[in-house]
Amino acid sequence: MSTAPAAPAAPFPAEPPAACDVLVVGGGINGAGIARDLAGRGLSVVLCEKDDLAAHTSSSSTKLIHGGLRYLEYYEFALVRKALAEREVLLKNAPHIMWPLRFVMPHDAAMRPVWMVRAGLFLYDHLARREVLPGSSTVDLRTHPAGAPLKKVFRKGFVYSDGWVDDARLVVLNAIDAAERGAAVLTRCACTDAQRGAQHWQATLRGADGVPRALRARALVNAAGPWAAQFLAEHAHAAERKSLRLVKGSHIVVPRLFEHEHAYIFQNTDKRIIFAIPYEGAYTLIGTTDVEHHGPIGAARIDADETTYLCAQASRYFERPVAPADVVWSYSGVRPLLDDESGDPAAVTRDYALELDTRQAPLLNVWGGKLTTYRKLAEEAADLLAAPLGTTRGTWTAAAPLPGGDLSAWIGAPQRPDTDFERFVQALTRRHPQLPMPLARRLARGYGARVETLLGPIGSLEEMGAEVAPGLYEAELRHLHRHEWARCADDVLWRRTKLGLHYDEGQRAQVAAWCVAHWRDAPAAPAAVAGDREASWT
């Protein structure tokens, strides 16, 4: 069976069909991944998201494709093995938005002993097969570049491999692939009611225009993330079968603290860990916290205690202290974790559970999960639905590049994801010499081989239209609206790109004003200066 999608569809449908095989509620990573997998198996799919794709938890991660080294201490060997195996699958299928990253763990004699760290890294190296990522090693921080910004008391370190991902773009690429395989992807469209019958669900969808639309679906997937239990009780009129524990994770961004390209993993005195990661060239990303969240899910924000905690823990290691005044941006997300009755939020499992109920029309609830295992979760979800929906098409996503991920037309046969991407950048600059290198690299990262959908026959910067803000041209804004469901400035500045971090307030306002002036479905007022509901500037 061919798994190649149809030619890019533009614009994507704004209206739902009257009926479908599966309605997926939730446009985060799990919902988008499930919609993609099901559409690739020939099922008719509608994906609805009440806000923007990845507007909440899925754009508020630490942005890592990783096995979860610290989960070994909680004996989560099956989860770590599954996540480790997925790292290289994802790296190979999306080398433009993912890349290998080496992590340095300075050894603190007051924390875990050397033997324990080495044992953990040995397991991490060998629980799953590696072809691309190198194994762990010990380094002398007195001579290694990663030791330069650290306090001199740290002399020994351990280095291991994981991966980095642009989390929000990962969601969008899954949604694009789902749409190109026939799914209807509806953003700013809430499922306000779902009545279950013996053979079908009768759902009511309500878009930004407020008009209710009826949809008949053979099956319903509840992938609403932290809203999953609420959706089930209030809109699907079903009893909650699992207990979710909502845990807020917050991150801070500060001006770059080091020049090299390694990331750090720091052990804290409370037995937790935080990461310090190179971010957007000029910055360092520090996170995350684990705090019980009891307020409105969509209103999660970092608090002063979390900022102080992250700064203090980073300052234990860096020679130059990190202070709250250094923070230029912060964001928070609410993780929907399976409640395993752990007292410490950091110890709550990051694994997932899929619950299929076929007593009437099929209902599949998605509980928990983590970014790294989204593809496997989606595959298992589609397998569960295959029998009740009568499809025999099998698994296909493991070897299917995400949109833009197949670089072979530009560089020939793939070799390694990281070196393949660098060869692609060189090929792009040869084909489009009019692009300044920073712009060429950013477009290559964002769109991969699909960059030609944006650039097409453009032969000069002038042909890309007005430069609305530094490095952001009208051609890209139109592309994001037409092909990627961008409807306001926040969609562009904080999810489709991270340009909002590089712009000042006036430049962000320019983008917002352009969107309002040129997009008929843009909000009537410019995007809020404070960014989306789970992020803020300082």
Image: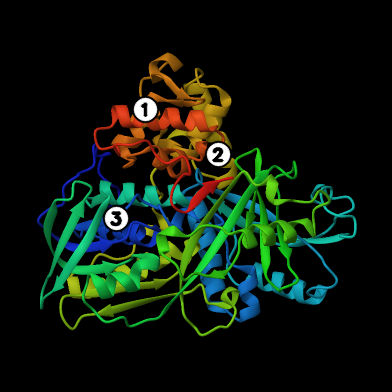
Amino acid type for the residue under numbered disc 2: Leu
Amino acid type for the residue under numbered disc 3: Lys
Determine the secondary structure under disc 2: helix
Residue ID for mark 3: 50
Determine the secondary structure under disc 1: helix
Q: CA distance from mark 2 to mark 3?
A: 25 Å
Describe residue 95's horizontal placement relative to residue 200 as left or right: right
Q: Nearest the camera: 463 or 489? A: 489
Residue ID for mark 1: 514
Q: Position of residue 433 (x, y in %)?
A: 51, 19
Q: Residue at x 55, y 22 (%)?
A: 436
Marks 2,1: beta carbons within 8 A: no
Describe residue 49's horizontal placement relative to residue 17 as left or right: right
- Residue 37 visible? The answer is yes
- Measured along the vertical axis of the image, is residue 95 above or below residue 504? below
Identify the mark at residue 501; answer none if there is no mark: 2
Specify few, some or many for label 1: CA neighbours under 10 Å numbering under 14, 14-19, or 20 or more.
Answer: some
Q: Position of residue 343 (x, y in %)?
A: 58, 83
Indicate the quadrant where residue 317 lies: bottom right
Q: Residue at x 39, y 39 (%)?
A: 527
Q: Position of residue 350 (x, y in %)?
A: 51, 72
Indicate the quadrant where residue 238 lies: bottom left
Mark 1 or 3, nearer chain start: 3
Mark 2 or 3, nearer chain start: 3
Q: Position of residue 114 (x, y in %)?
A: 82, 73
Specify few, some or many for label 3: CA neighbours under 10 Å numbering under 14, 14-19, or 20 or more.
Answer: many
